[in-house]
Image (cartoon, rainbow, N blue to C red):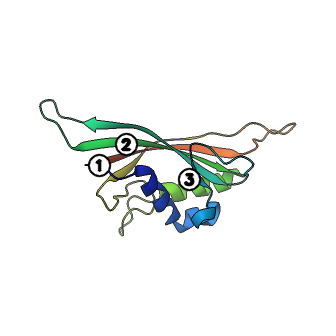
């Protein structure tokens, strides 16, 4: 399987609703592992999890499963919900998946959202509101090597 992280970033940059929030091209706020220090605002941070071979009870398989975790961080809750919806997309669109969920990439790998939950940041001092609004999305990518 070619590099899942490269495919992830390329796909996110191809979704207009994502780039409208995090930026496009080399200035897009899409980073591996952690946010760049001193950067504020809306961003997507991703991390690759394990790659597992999927074998049958009696035979080896060429199928692998890669896990990718995305942390979506935004300045407001409505903006976080908009960005999460753009990243997930509509897997049932008649012209193909509009985001990552349900997308089949050029190599035939199939991307599925398997977990999602809100992850609000630390609370602001003296206010009952977080400093930022986050969400964690876990995708599994099934691919034949």
Q: Are marks 1 and 2 in contact (CB under 8 Å)?
A: yes
Tell me residue 11's x, y (percent). Answer: 46, 61
SS assignment at label 3: helix
In the rendered view, does 127 fall on the left or right side of 4? right
Q: From the image, tell me which residue sits under label 3.
A: 84
Q: Nearer the viewer, mark 3 or mark 1?
A: 1
Against 120, residue 73 (above or below) is below
Secondary structure under tag 2 reads strand
Q: Residue at x 74, y 36 (%)?
A: 122
Task: Tell me how far mark 1 sits from mark 2, CA to CA.
Answer: 8 Å
Q: Residues within 10 Å of mark 3 (few under 14, many from 20)?
A: many
Secondary structure of the residue carrying numbered label 1: strand
Q: Is residue 74 above or below residue 90?
A: above
Q: Would residue 59 be found to the left or right of residue 50 on screen?
A: left
Q: Position of residue 40 (x, y in %)?
A: 73, 52
- Horizontal relation, residue 75 to residue 101: left or right: right
Q: Residue at x 29, y 42 (%)?
A: 64
Q: Give the Cα distance between marks 3 and 1.
A: 24 Å
Residue at screen point 64% across, 44% down: 134
Disc assigned to residue 66: 2
- Name the residue that disc number 1 marks: 143
Q: CA distance from mark 2 to mark 3?
A: 20 Å
Is the residue under label 1 in contact with that under label 3 (CB below 8 Å)? no
Instruction: Please give the label number shown on residue 130.
Output: none
Q: Disc 2 or 3, which lies upstream in sequence?
A: 2
Residue 89 point in image, percent of width and height? 47, 59
Is the C-beta separation of discs 2 and 3 under 8 Å? no
Q: Is residue 136 above or below residue 21?
A: above
Q: Horizontal placement of 112 versus 42: left or right? A: left
Q: Image quadrant of residue 60?
A: top left
């Amino acid at each position: 399987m070619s590099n899942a992280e490269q495919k992830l970033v390329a796909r996110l940059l191809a979704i207009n609703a994502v780039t409208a929030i995090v930026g496009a091209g080399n200035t897009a706020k899409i980073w591996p592992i952690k946010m760049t220090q001193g950067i504020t605002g809306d961003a997507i941070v991703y991390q690759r999890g394990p790659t597992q071979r999927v074998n049958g009870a009696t035979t080896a398989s060429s199928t692998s499963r890669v896990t990718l975790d995305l942390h979506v961080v935004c300045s407001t809750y409505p903006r976080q919900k908009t960005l999460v919806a753009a990243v997930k997309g509509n897997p049932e669109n008649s012209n193909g998946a509009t985001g990552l969920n349900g997308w089949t990439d050029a190599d035939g790998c199939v991307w599925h959202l398997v977990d999602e939950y809100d992850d609000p940041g630390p609370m602001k001092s003296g206010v009952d509101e977080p400093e930022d609004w986050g969400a964690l999305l876990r995708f599994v990518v099934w691919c034949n090597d």
